[in-house]
Amino acid sequence: MPAKTPPRRRPTESDVARHAGVSQSAVSRAFTPGASIAEATREKILASARELGFHTNLVARSLATSRTNIVALAIANLENPFYAQVVTELSVRLRETGRHILLFTTSQEAAADPELERVLSYQVDALILAATTATPELTSQCRKNGIPIVQINRESKIAGISTVRGENQRAAEQVAQFLIAGGHSNFAFIGGTPDSNTSLIRQEAFCNHLRSLGFPSVKVAHGHYSFQGAATATREILSGDTPVDAIFCASDYMAFAALDVVRREFGLNVPRDISIVGVDDVPEAGHAAYDLTTYSQPAGSLAEEAIKIIDQQIAHPGRRAQRREVRGELILRGSARMPETSVFTIDGKKVWRS
Amino acid sequence: MPAKTPPRRRPTESDVARHAGVSQSAVSRAFTPGASIAEATREKILASARELGFHTNLVARSLATSRTNIVALAIANLENPFYAQVVTELSVRLRETGRHILLFTTSQEAAADPELERVLSYQVDALILAATTATPELTSQCRKNGIPIVQINRESKIAGISTVRGENQRAAEQVAQFLIAGGHSNFAFIGGTPDSNTSLIRQEAFCNHLRSLGFPSVKVAHGHYSFQGAATATREILSGDTPVDAIFCASDYMAFAALDVVRREFGLNVPRDISIVGVDDVPEAGHAAYDLTTYSQPAGSLAEEAIKIIDQQIAHPGRRAQRREVRGELILRGSARMPETSVFTIDGKKVWRS
DNA sequence: TTAGCGCTTGCATGCGTATGCAAAACTGGC
DNA sequence: GCCAGTTTTGCATACGCATGCAAGCGCTAA
């Protein structure tokens, strides 16, 4: 009966050292960029390492350096393609600096997610939250441990949390202006969760702008950032007794649901009977099936800014939290009636100049 | 000038031990389920830990136990909602056993991704590949180090890699049967990448089945699993001189592109002029804008089986690689012409019995 | 009262790498 | 050929936790 394959221990630096006839520290230095080691020795060591199939044990390195090069990413709503994009963009950019993502999928009300406290145990270098918010406890714990937190697309009332977001205020106002120019007069808004301040800011900017221009009050419903939720919200809005000829949705994903319901269940023609506008400009918004007019929020830029903030906070631990805004623009497509004037075509792209 | 906040070192077990008047090992045991420790001591320690804000340092624990409780997940195509679902399902299930995901986004041809070798450095407990395949080198490295590999939705010619997939063969045959029953006679297939064997198996089963029944040869084009790629493939298929009245796509995501092109660019009516069928049954397939007929491939089951395999491999390191198939079913919606017979409505759901 | 047993506890060491410090090996100039 | 200066190297220890082992403890039974 053949002996079991020995549980072959992974080679360590000591193994490599022995094989190359040097000390363990030499091996360590051979793998540390900028360390003091002769080129010849270094090559001899790398050769041995290759031969033995050695790979630096990052766990041990992390213990010794107390840096893991791991960033925790908590994300809700991965089914929303916008956040899938955010994940991808973050991943690509972090990889450029040799870092990786430890993924936590959470519910929207991460406020209540105790699981997130585990980030503290994992000794991650930073914490990024997308579509969720940190609890005050988590925040203070992280601060105590010097772990910077950045929230993407969610504001926070808590001090100490940095924020990256799109142009919520401007987006809402531009959309309002655009819909007015398109001749609409009965507006509705589909928000995310009632407590999401991103959604709230958009809602208030949208409503205030319209109110200040004398339009009747905006119908508001909440889609909770989910597809089904938004579908329900749309039904609610269209079933009321006041007519609605334009719906502004707090995300493209919810706008898709609105389009579905408006067309299939209410038999309306878009944009003849009703206009629908979203926010994000996810790839799907450009697909023929939706052809959604929307205010963009570039995932790549959000990711980039988030990482910049993290890096700064790591470099200057004392520095206070930052808030950054990333520019977007109104993307004209077929889901909203075009104004008769002020629409120009530049480089084959339609643009509206208010 | 006020002193800077001291770089407050995180409390360690020794700190807690001192505070609670016990030894460091006692603290360790207090946090190790099943360890030998008196309940009273344990509580005293937990109290101290809470007071000091102590959290187990998982890096140190990992070094000591040589288990990280981290599973590496390499994923291509996160923009395809199917894989976003897979990620979520894996995340939820792994969390149940206290594990987390270290995310690697790769290109489809991960064959060429050297970045993945890093999983070896991170000492992960297992490696899951979704929509990509491992290189032989990576595979042997992993085997040497006792890291099990599971591929989701991609077969592998390499020994030592476990596999979880949907019913590729049956799916293709069922779809062929269904389209025939719907009265179609000119078929096309849009595959993923030419070297994806998942796509190949579907293609061959589809084509062989039709050929054996005497239908003209199936037009084949490759969409490379991307939206734009599938759009191009669709144009290619429809621009030929032979007519096509049914397209089977290797994924829902590509089917969406086909629908877009067929409708917008060729002005065809679906399903009157042409039928389109996908595979996966992603949530979007049920949305009104697509209403796609498709063969399902349950992401949750795939995730579950993948984890089961991993756990077995970890428990029995010697055991050889496994291949599992997860059941799906044909989901009838509006993108494909209904056969005039054999379609029943069960629980409000349409079902086809060939 | 004491031997014996089982449950708790602490001691000591190991996990694999990084790094300050001092010793060793070079280097170049004279 | 020798010395001062510069690299390069090895030694020793730290990082924070887990765990085998033996000592300590309380309790039961004789």
Image: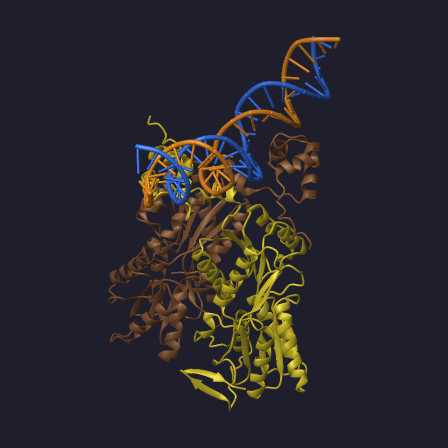
Chain colours: A yellow, B brown, C orange, D blue
Q: Residue at x 32, y 74 (%)?
A: B235
Q: How many circles with numbers are drawn on the protein?
A: 0
Q: Nearer the viewer, residue B340 or A117?
A: A117
For residue A344, say whether it is visible.
Answer: yes
Quarter of the image where one finds residue A318? bottom right
Q: Residue furthest bottom?
A: A341
Q: Residue at x 24, y 64 (%)?
A: B214
Quarter of the image where one finds residue B25? top right
Q: Nearer the viewer, residue A243 or B330?
A: A243
Q: Is residue A188 above or below residue A354?
A: above
Q: Position of residue A345 (x, y in %)?
A: 43, 86
Q: Is residue B135 above or below residue D29?
A: below
Q: Nearer the viewer, residue B207 or B82?
A: B82
Q: Position of residue A168 (x, y in %)?
A: 59, 73
**In the displayed structure image, the side of residue D11 where residue A317 appears, left or right:** right
For residue B146, say whether it is visible.
Answer: no
Quarter of the image where one finds residue B223? bottom left
Q: Is residue A134 above or below residue B265?
A: above
Q: Position of residue B243 (x, y in %)?
A: 28, 75
The N terminus of chain A sits in image quarter: top left
Q: Residue at x 57, y 42 (%)?
A: B57
Q: Position of residue A229 (x, y in %)?
A: 59, 67
Q: Nearer the viewer, residue A137 or A25?
A: A25
The C terminus of chain A sits in image quarter: bottom right
**In the displayed structure image, the side of residue A272 where residue B113 appears, left or right:** left
